[in-house]
C-alpha cells in the first residue's frame, strides 16, 4: 500500500517535527546518555550513506568505513594542521569522502561489478587504513590525533549536549538531501541499476556513471559523518575505521532494512544502544551481539523498517513526488 | 521519404560462431517490419547488435544518416533507438509509475545539484514528467495500477508497462523482442493495437520479432525472414507467403 495524499503530508510534518522535538532531548539527559544519542546521530549517517550503495544501488561496497575515516581524518587535519574552524571542515570532509568514493568505484567505469567491485572497495578501505597508520607525520600513526576544543558563534562545543545540536542539524540536512535524490530521476536510476542494469541502459541512462555517482554521494554523507565523529570523540585513530566497524555498519543497514532511509536510523539506533545493555555480560558481549543480530534478521529479513511499513503505509517509500 | 534506420552489412562473430552474416535492412518512419525465422536464426542477435549490446565485427547502423554502430547501449538509446527485452526488462521492486518515469530520464530536467537541493525547476520538470507518465498509462487503461509494484503485475501487464516505458520518450525507432509472447489472445490484440497506433499516429519505425505468424501477416508492413544468421527473404506479407526460400527454411522442403 502506498501512502495517501494526506499521509504524505503527515509524513512531511513528521520529518521536521521529530528533529524539532529532539532539540529538547539534551534537557533531559546526563552526559552518558547524551554521548550515546550523539553516536546514534552519527551512525545513522554512516548507515544512510552505506545503505545508499548496498541497498539502493545494490552493489557490495566495503570502502565505507574507510571513507568515514577519510572524513574524520580530513576534518582533524584541517582543524589541527590548518587551523580551520571545525564547522567549515564538515563539507570539506564530505568532499574528501566523495573523492574517496570516486576512487573506490572508478573501476565500475570499466565494467567491474558486484564481487569484483566489492573486493576492490575492500582493498581500497584497507589501503586507507594503512595510510592512517603509516602516514605518521600527518595522521599521528597508531597514536592518532586529537581535535582541539571548538566553538561556533562564541558557543563552546566541548560538552555533548552542545554538540548534539550541530550534529542534529547536519544530519537533518543530509537526510533531506538523500531523500530528495531518491525521489528524483537520479534515485530511480540508482535503483533501476540494482533491478536490471541492462534494461536501465536501454532507456538511455548512463549506468556506469550512475554507479560512480552513488558511491560519491555515499562517500559525501559518510565523510560528513566522519567530521562529526572527529569532534564527537575529539580524537581519531586508525582502530575506529577497521574491519570490525565495517561489519557493524553493515549489520546496521541489514537490521534497519536494505534500501530504507528510516531503516538506517533504526539500525544505527538499535546497534548503538544494544552494546550498552550488553555491558552487564562481560566477556559475552560480542557473542550476544552476534546472536541478537542473527535473530533479528531471521525474524525480520527486511529489517526493522518492515515492521513500520506493516504498521502504516506512511512509512512506505515512494520514489517520486508531485 | 527519407530512411529512418539503415542497417548495412551487419556482421557479428562470437568466438567460432558466425551469428550474423551481412544483414541489411531499411526502415521508414511509421513502418512496422517483422523479423521472423526459426530459433537460432539470429533475430535477437540482430537486435543486440543494433542496440549496442553486442559489438558488430562489420557493418553500419545509421539513424537518420548518423552512424550509431559501436556506441554504448545507453548512447544508442539516447539517440532514439529503444528496445524491449525478450525475457522482460521491468524493475520489479519499483512501481509501475516509477518504471515509466525511468523511461523519461533523459527528458527530465534539473542538474544533480538542483535535485539534491530540491530546487523548484527540478521539481517542476519532475511533476511534468509524472503527468506525462500518468497520461500514457491512462492510454493503456493502466492508470489505476500506477502505484502497484511492477513485480506484482501479471505477465501481460508487465509487457504492456515495459512497452509504455520504452515509448514514453517517443523514440523514432523501436525494437520489440517478442512483445506478445505469453499473452492471452485478448491482450495480444491489445498489444498489436498499441503497436499499430505508435506506427500510425506517431510515425515510429518498428522492428518486431514475433513467432506468431498470423499476427505478423496481419500486422506488419514488411517481413524479413532470417535463417542461420542471414537474411533469406524480405518483402510484403503477400510476397513472403509465396517465397520458396522461406518455405524451405521453415519446412525443410519446397
Image (cartoon, coloured by chain):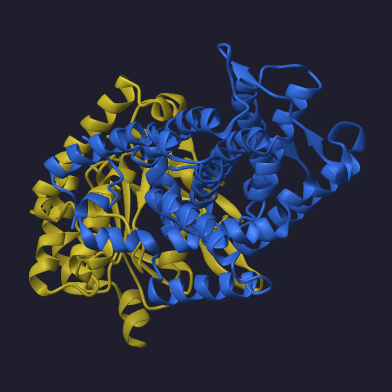
Chain colours: A blue, B yellow
The outermost residue toward the top is A154
Figure quadrant of residue A300: bottom left
The quarter of the picture where the C terminus of chain B appears is bottom left
Figure quadrant of residue A42: top right
Residue at horizontal 62 percent and vertical 75 percent from the top: A287
Closer-to-camera residue (A190/A309): A309
The quarter of the picture where the N terminus of chain B appears is top left
Asked if A2 appears above or below A100 in the picture, the reply is below
Figure quadrant of residue B169: top left
Closer-to-camera residue (B141/A54): A54
Residue at horizontal 18 percent and vertical 37 percent from the top: A9
- The percent position of residue A126, horizontal first and vertical second, equals 78, 53
Q: Is residue A58 visible?
A: no
Q: Is residue B101 visible?
A: yes
- The percent position of residue A71, horizontal first and vertical second, equals 67, 35
Closer-to-camera residue (A130/A28): A28
Q: Count the numbered circles shown.
A: 0
- The percent position of residue A288, horizontal first and vertical second, equals 57, 74
Q: Is residue A286 left or right of residue B248?
A: right
Asked if B101 appears above or below A231 in the picture, the reply is below
Asked if B225 appears above or below A54 in the picture, the reply is below
Closer-to-camera residue (B76/B157): B157
Residue at horizontal 50 percent and vertical 42 percent from the top: A41
- The percent position of residue A264, horizontal first and vertical second, equals 45, 51
Residue at horizontal 13 percent and vertical 47 percent from the top: A4
Amino acid at each position: 500500500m502506498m501512502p495517501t495524499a494526506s499521509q504524505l503530508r503527515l509524513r512531511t510534518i513528521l520529518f521536521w517535527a521529530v528533529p524539532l522535538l529532539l532539540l529538547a532531548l539534551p534537557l533531559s539527559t546526563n552526559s552518558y546518555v547524551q554521548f550515546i544519542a550523539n553516536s546514534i546521530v552519527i551512525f545513522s549517517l554512516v548507515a544512510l550513506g552505506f545503505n545508499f550503495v548496498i541497498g539502493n544501488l545494490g552493489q557490495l561496497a566495503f570502502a565505507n568505513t574507510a571513507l568515514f575515516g577519510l572524513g574524520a581524518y580530513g576534518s582533524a587535519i584541517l582543524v589541527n594542521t590548518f587551523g580551520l574552524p571545525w564547522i567549515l571542515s564538515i563539507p570539506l570532509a564530505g568532499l574528501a569522502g566523495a573523492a574517496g568514493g570516486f576512487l573506490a568505484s572508478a573501476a565500475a567505469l570499466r565494467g567491474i561489478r558486484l564481487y569484483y567491485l566489492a573486493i576492490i572497495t575492500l582493498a581500497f578501505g584497507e589501503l586507507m587504513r594503512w595510510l592512517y597508520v603509516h602516514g605518521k607525520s600527518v595522521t599521528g600513526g597508531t597514536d592518532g590525533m586529537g581535535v582541539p576544543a571548538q566553538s561556533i558563534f562564541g558557543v563552546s562545543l566541548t560538552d555533548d549536549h552542545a554538540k548534539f545540536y550541530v550534529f542534529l542539524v547536519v544530519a537533518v540536512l543530509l537526510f533531506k538531501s538523500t531523500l530528495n535524490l531518491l525521489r528524483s530521476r537520479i534515485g530511480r536510476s540508482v535503483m533501476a541499476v540494482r533491478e536490471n542494469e541492462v534494461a536501465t541502459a536501454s532507456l538511455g541512462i548512463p549506468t556506469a556513471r550512475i554507479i560512480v555517482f552513488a558511491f560519491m554521494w555515499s562517500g559525501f554523507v559518510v565523510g560528513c559523518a566522519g567530521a562529526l565523529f572527529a569532534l564527537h570523540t575529539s580524537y581519531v585513530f586508525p582502530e575506529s575505521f577497521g574491519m570490525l566497524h565495517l561489519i557493524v555498519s553493515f549489520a546496521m543497514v541489514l537490521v534497519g532494512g536494505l534500501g530504507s532511509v528510516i531503516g538506517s536510523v533504526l539500525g544505527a539506533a538499535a546497534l548503538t544502544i544494544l552494546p550498552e545493555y550488553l555491558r552487564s555480560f562481560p566477556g559475552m558481549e560480542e557473542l550476544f551481539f552476534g546472536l541478537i543480530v542473527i535473530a533479528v534478521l531471521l525474524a525480520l529479513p527486511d529489517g526493522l523498517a518492515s515492521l513500520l511499513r506493516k504498521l502504516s503505509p506512511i512509512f512506505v517509500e515512494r520514489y517520486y513526488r508531485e | 521519404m527519407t530512411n529512418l534506420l539503415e542497417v548495412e552489412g551487419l556482421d557479428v562473430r562470437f568466438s567460432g560462431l558466425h551469428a550474423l552474416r551481412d544483414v541489411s535492412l531499411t526502415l521508414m518512419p511509421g513502418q512496422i517490419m517483422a523479423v521472423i525465422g526459426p530459433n537460432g536464426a539470429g533475430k535477437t542477435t540482430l537486435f543486440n547488435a543494433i542496440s549496442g549490446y553486442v559489438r558488430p565485427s562489420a557493418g553500419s547502423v545509421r539513424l537518420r544518416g548518423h552512424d550509431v554502430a559501436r556506441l554504448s547501449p545507453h548512447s544508442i538509446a539516447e539517440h532514439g533507438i529503444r528496445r524491449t527485452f525478450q525475457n522482460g526488462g521491468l524493475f520489479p521492486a519499483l512501481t509501475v509509475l516509477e518504471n515509466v518515469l525511468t523511461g523519461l530520464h533523459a527528458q527530465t530536467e534539473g542538474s544533480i545539484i538542483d535535485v539534491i537541493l530540491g530546487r523548484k525547476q527540478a521539481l517542476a520538470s519532475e511533476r511534468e514528467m509524472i503527468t506525462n507518465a500518468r497520461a500514457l498509462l491512462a492510454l493503456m487503461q493502466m492508470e489505476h495500477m500506477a502505484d502497484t509494484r511492477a513485480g506484482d503485475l501479471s505477465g501481460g501487464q508487465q509487457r504492456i508497462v515495459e512497452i509504455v516505458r520504452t515509448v514514453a520518450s517517443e523514440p523514432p525507432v523501436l525494437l520489440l523482442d517478442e512483445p506478445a509472447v505469453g499473452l492471452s489472445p485478448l491482450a495480444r490484440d491489445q498489444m498489436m493495437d498499441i503497436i499499430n497506433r505508435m506506427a500510425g499516429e506517431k510515425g515510429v519505425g518498428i522492428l518486431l520479432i514475433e513467432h506468431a505468424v498470423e499476427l505478423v501477416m496481419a500486422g506488419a508492413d514488411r517481413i524479413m525472414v532470417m535463417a542461420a544468421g542471414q537474411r533469406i527473404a524480405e518483402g510484403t506479407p503477400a510476397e513472403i507467403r509465396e517465397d520458396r526460400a522461406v518455405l524451405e527454411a521453415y519446412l525443410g522442403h519446397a
